[in-house]
Amino acid sequence: MDTSQKRGYIRAAISFAMLIAGIIFSAAGLSFFADKYIQLAWYIIAYIPVGVPVIKEAIEAMRQKDVFSEFTLMSIATIGAFFIGEYPEGVAVMLFYAVGELFQDAAVNRAKRSISALLDVRPETATVIKADKTETVPAESVNVGDIVEVKVGERVPLDGVMLGESASFNTAALTGESVPRTIRRDEEVFAGMILTDNVSRIKVTKPFGMSALARILDLVQNATEKKAPAEQFIRKFARIYTPIVVALAALIVIVPVVYSAINPAFDFVLYDWVYRGLVFLVISCPCALVISIPLGYFGGIGAASRRGILFKGSNYLEAITKINTVVMDKTGTLTQGVFKVQKIVPAEHLLETDLVNLVASVETQSTHPIAKAIVEYAKEQNIAVVKPEIVNEIAGHGLQASINGKMVLVGNPKLLLKNSVEFPPEIAIIPETIVVCAIDGKYAGYLLVADAPKADAKAAVNALYDLGIKNIVMLSGDKQAIVSQLAEELNITQAHGDLLPEGKVEYVEQLKSDPGNNIAFVGDGINDAPVLAMSNVGIAMGGLGSDVAIETADVILQTDQPSRIATAIKIGSATRRIVVQNISFALAVKLVVLILGAFGVASLWGAVFADVGVSLLAILNAIRILKMNFD
């Protein structure tokens, strides 16, 4: 709690104590308190701690040409209460309004803390290695190329690359993932990650202010600048609504005055009608709407950021609720984006380990991603490889090598055809990528290498179906046979392969030609930038280290999990429900009490409890989204 908040609570406590004491003095019939001037002085003193700050705000708002602010309404209503001799009620109205404002501030600060929690994960210092000595320096002073040391339990101060073999990092503060992530040599490490196993050294690649974390913080802190339609509406509504109710409050007093002048028989009591007008003013205050609706969206953005989902603005939180078509890129979105050995099929005369040994030995001489995947697999399985004696690359086909006096062919089926090696005919119709092998002119088997689906890919698709989104499309530049096979595995009915980037754009343009389609495109944020930009909501996967993702997408899924798409939609829908509830509830209660006040049924006490009560209930309703479970 900051100093200004503490002062606010102290002022409210003083006013409350004096208000209660004054009411007790009156009820007890104490002689000194029977004097009306003493009562007036007592309640003015009680009013000053909570009333003066609000009157100052009203004056400042008027200077900014905001004449009909809630501060102005409260000032007029409470001064009017003093004018007609209702001192306790005048103090009570301002006191409860001030208490309501304190609760609002507390709620906003709570929501801000949930969003700005990332601020706590930026270390202020870094341990830099210089001439084999460690030196602790401010993180801002570390230069690109410096080597920093991170101990177990410490946070990484700047973005960099791993210098050691491997280390495990807790990324929960950045991505919401509870499972630690293992990062190997030369892989990226991001500021804010927590080292969990052994001391590691990292080579800095970006200055402090340009780290992925710094960009994410900037994104989140500015997210509330892009207002949702409901926020824009309520601000416009308040600017029209407030002057109208002030005019109506004035008419409640003026009309009876005029009517009594025309009809002397009309029993006109100024006190009664001024009192009704004041009740009307208090209950008309739009603060419940003005604060609870932005707070609802603020809470939604905070709830999403806790789960590694970054919305660039509350307008996208609103837009995602209208999505009825989800178009997803395949590689890097639904699949892991890296080749892995999925299957090993040796010829009858050969063992799996022998086949892997030969193929991996030959592939050590290639830099192709498929070759790297096979070599990595051999390493993981502790299968030793040897260095080929002679290696020849046959462009578009594969490699020819000599290993221990044997001539080994490793490549695609065309390589075997070129060298007149017979192989099983079913190999030619396998849709996935395969690497075949022949030894001394005889077929030796094949390895199937594929980009595996992400662990939650199928669950992600099913979750979208459960939300009522039936139009799910997968696009890819891969062969149609591979795309169709994955689509069948994931239960996606529409899948299009063999697409260049412009082909994806054309397909989404075709979908957009139907005004009934509200499209979310989900891609990796790099080569899908044009489609991300043109969709109704662009969602980038794994945007933690992607500049293009942060620049182009509207929503960024830091966890790289497609299941978070449904989570983002659920959070958007829950936020919208809360906002609609707050608007409906606040307007309904205000309308009822406005009517009761106009007819003299509601008192100032009832008006202030209704106004502050509605505000507090709306605030509590808004911040409960932070506690909701969306998984």
Image (cartoon, rainbow, N blue to C red):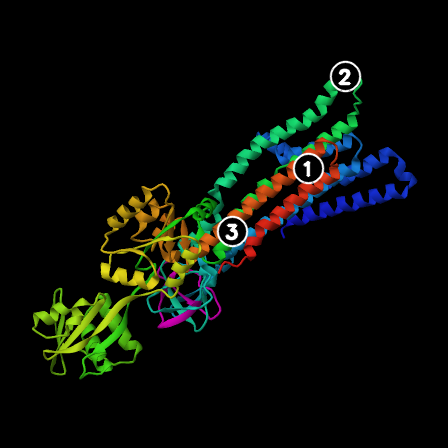
Instruction: Count neighbours of disc 2 (C-alpha within 10 A) and say few if under 14, some if 14 to 19, many if 20 or more.
Output: few
* In-image side of 579 versus 370 (left or right): right
* Residue type of the residue flagged with mark 3: Ala
Q: Looking at the image, is mark 2 or mark 3 nearer the viewer?
A: 2
Q: Is residue 575 visible?
A: yes
Q: In the image, which residues are magenta? A: 143-169
Judge by depth and name the residue closer to the eye, 89 or 172: 89
* In-image side of 62 versus 13 (left or right): left
Residue 424 image point, x, y percent: 15, 74
- The tag on residue 56 is none
SS class of the residue under badge 3? helix
- Mark 2 to mark 3 CA distance (whole Å): 56 Å
* Residue type of the residue flagged with mark 1: Val
SS class of the residue under badge 1? helix
Residue 441 image point, x, y percent: 9, 78
Asked if residue 160 is among those painted magenta in the image, a careful observer would answer yes
For marks 1 and 2, the one nearer the N-term is 2
Instruction: Count neighbours of disc 1 (C-alpha within 10 A) and say few if under 14, some if 14 to 19, many if 20 or more.
Output: many
* In-image side of 426 versus 559 (left or right): left
Judge by depth and name the residue closer to the eye, 40 or 533: 533
The residue pinned by badge 2 equals 263
For marks 1 and 3, the one nearer the N-term is 3
- The tag on residue 593 is 1
SS class of the residue under badge 2? loop
Q: Pointer 1 and pointer 2: residues touching (CB < 8 Å)? A: no
Q: Pointer 1 and pointer 3: residues touching (CB < 8 Å)? A: no
- Mark 1 to mark 2 CA distance (whole Å): 29 Å
- At a point 34% along the width and 61% down the height, the residue shown is 491
| Quadrant of res 46 | top right
Q: Is residue 562 visible?
A: no
Rendered view: 368 above or below 600: below
- The tag on residue 574 is 3
